[in-house]
């Protein structure tokens, strides 16, 4: 065997979750779960492995995601396999697979990990977890409204002040019409260019626009892309559902910002599209999107001749977590991963009796850890306190012979003695939830 030691670094662009990180991740997942279920969404899941064909279907051949960002390999049986880069094609496949049996409309959610071969940077990694919520068979625009209301409520349930984020909204038809008016029919390549508007210097972006619309329309088109004037919607199509979505959300007390330049990178969107950004003091979007989604009416057509409409969004854990950390929105209690009670045997001879006592207290639904290390009792007490345990119970010869143990509340120093079953009420009463 070679003497060269392996690196302890994780693979580029993915994260290890040590317990303190995992505690925050768990809090994020629990908040997502609670919010989705409060809207009546049901959870589904699938494997991270998908046949590569799922992402190569017609219409997707130009996609940056498919061509440059997927992890694709050939398995031992010669099949081309992809680590899922997003959940939408998977869920469309699952819906189409049981289309006859499923009673529409359906509200489904999932929290998959996704893999994209991106250049790792702030807010962008090669593996992220994404809260996916979709409504299938909800053809009415009320589905769009409900979905965006769910996205909004998710932010609120993390304790975010509505002043701190903005929901940008647009409609694919609007974008298509705007392009048509300016002499372009190629919405697919246009969205890819427009998607980069906020990421490029103005002049560089305008240069790119020359590939989208005739050169003499570039200035006009650029101005229109930057106008957030809702009368623009009317000028394109008075029946456009976008206005109804915006007004409907307002009735629910949710403000959105009409953004003609919002394009979204996927070719499958056909209607409402939206994204949520953090905003600075002046109300201007900063950084990367925390959430993005839209309506896609034809995705199940890859699998069957009967289309089922879908509308949904994905919210990433990376940008959300950065945002919550930067705004001090992760409650302290979340980070405490230690058991409520730590039982401390004085010597290793008392380890097994200590395990028995711990087991008795656990029967009452209290979490108990036993410190079976070989350190001195004082060291163990200090360690239990550092880890944030609320109560300690020291077990020595006396406790074992008498069967009477003493529990100490580390915060108040209050102590109580009795049999394990006599002490569980005391522990429960003194376990403050904060
Ligand atoms: P997306 O805009 O590609 O949409 O991703 C949604 C969110 O996932 C982004 O706003 C971002 O927070 C996060 N995200 C995406 N890529 C990365 C990455 N490399 N690192 C960290 N976070 C990332 C979709 O994926 C659509 N399939 C969403 C959807 C569901 N549309 C309809 N239903």
Image (tube, grey):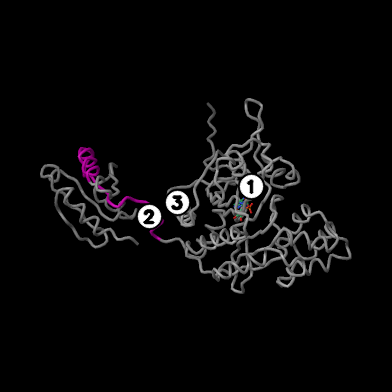
- Which numbered marker is on residue 26? 3
At 75% from the left and 56% from the top, the residue drawn is: 191
Q: In the depicted view, which residue is nearer to us: 285 or 307?
A: 307
Earlier in the chain: of badge 3 and badge 2, it is 3
Above or below for 262 versus 14 = below
User: Which of pointers 2 and 1 indicates the residue nearer the eye?
Assistant: 1
> In terms of secondary structure, where does tag 1 sit?
loop
Considering the image in quadrants, where does the C terminus appear? bottom left
How far across and how far down the image is residue 350, in percent? 20, 40
User: Which of pointers 3 and 1 indicates the residue nearer the eye?
Assistant: 1
Residue linked to disc 1: 308
User: Which of pointers 3 and 2 indicates the residue nearer the eye?
Assistant: 3
Q: CA distance from mark 3 to mark 1?
A: 33 Å
| Contact between labelled residues 2 and 3, with CB atoms less than 8 Å apart | no
Residue linked to disc 2: 336
Q: In the depicted view, which residue is nearer to us: 127 or 103?
A: 103
How far across and how far down the image is residue 6, in percent? 54, 36
Query: Local crowd at mark 3 within 10 Å, few (<14), some, or many (≥20)?
Result: few
- Outermost residue on the bottom side: it is 282
Q: In the depicted view, which residue is nearer to us: 366 or 261?
A: 261
In reply to whether residue 357 is colored magenta, the answer given is yes
- Outermost residue on the left side: it is 402
Which residues make up the magenta segment? 332-360
Q: CA distance from mark 3 to mark 2?
A: 12 Å
> In terms of secondary structure, where does tag 2 sit?
loop
At 17% from the left and 45% from the top, the residue drawn is: 396
In the image, taking residue 182 as reference, residue 362 lies left or right, namely left
Above or below for 326 versus 43 = below
Earlier in the chain: of badge 2 and badge 1, it is 1
């Amino acid at each position: 065997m070679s003497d060269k030691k392996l690196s302890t670094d994780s693979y580029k662009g993915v994260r290890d979750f040590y317990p303190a990180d995992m505690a925050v991740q768990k809090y994020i997942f629990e908040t997502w779960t609670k919010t989705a279920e409060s809207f009546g969404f049901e959870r589904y899941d699938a494997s991270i492995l998908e046949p590569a064909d799922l992402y190569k279907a017609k219409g997707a051949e130009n996609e940056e995601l498919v061509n440059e960002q997927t992890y694709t390999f050939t398995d031992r049986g010669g099949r081309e396999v992809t680590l899922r880069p997003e959940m939408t094609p998977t869920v469309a496949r699952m819906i189409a697979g049981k289309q006859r049996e499923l009673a529409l409309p359906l509200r489904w959610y999932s929290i998959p990990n996704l893999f994209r071969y991106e250049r790792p940077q702030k807010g962008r990694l090669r593996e992220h977890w994404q809260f996916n919520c979709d409504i299938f068979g909800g053809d009415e625009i009320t589905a769009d409204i409900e979905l965006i209301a769910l996205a909004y409520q998710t932010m609120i349930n993390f304790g975010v002040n509505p002043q701190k984020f903005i929901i940008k909204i647009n409609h694919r038809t609007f974008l298509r019409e705007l392009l048509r008016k300016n002499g372009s029919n190629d919405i697919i390549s246009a969205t890819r260019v427009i998607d980069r508007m906020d990421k490029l210097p103005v002049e560089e972006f305008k240069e790119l626009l020359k590939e989208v619309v005739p050169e003499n329309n570039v200035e006009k088109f650029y101005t229109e892309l930057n106008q957030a004037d809702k009368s623009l919607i009317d000028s394109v199509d008075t029946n456009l559902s976008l206005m109804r979505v915006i007004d409907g959300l307002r009735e629910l007390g949710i403000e959105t910002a009409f953004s003609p330049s919002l394009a979204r990178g996927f070719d499958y969107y056909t209607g409402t599209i939206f994204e949520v950004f953090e905003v600075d003091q002046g109300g201007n979007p900063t950084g990367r999107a925390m959430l993005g989604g839209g309506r896609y009416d034809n995705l199940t057509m890859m699998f069957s001749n009967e289309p089922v409409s879908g509308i949904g969004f994905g919210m990433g854990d990376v940008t959300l977590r950065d945002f919550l950390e930067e705004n001090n929105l992760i409650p302290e209690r979340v980070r405490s991963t230690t058991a409520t009670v730590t039982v401390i045997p004085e010597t290793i001879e008392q380890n097994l009796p200590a395990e028995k006592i711990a087991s008795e207290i656990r029967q009452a639904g209290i979490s108990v850890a036993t410190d079976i290390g070989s350190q001195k009792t004082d060291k163990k007490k200090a360690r239990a306190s550092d880890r944030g345990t609320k109560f300690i119970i020291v077990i020595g010869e006396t406790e074992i012979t008498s069967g009477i143990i003493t529990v100490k509340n580390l915060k108040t120093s209050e102590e109580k003695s009795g049999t394990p079953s006599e002490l569980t009420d005391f522990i429960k009463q003194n376990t403050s939830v904060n």
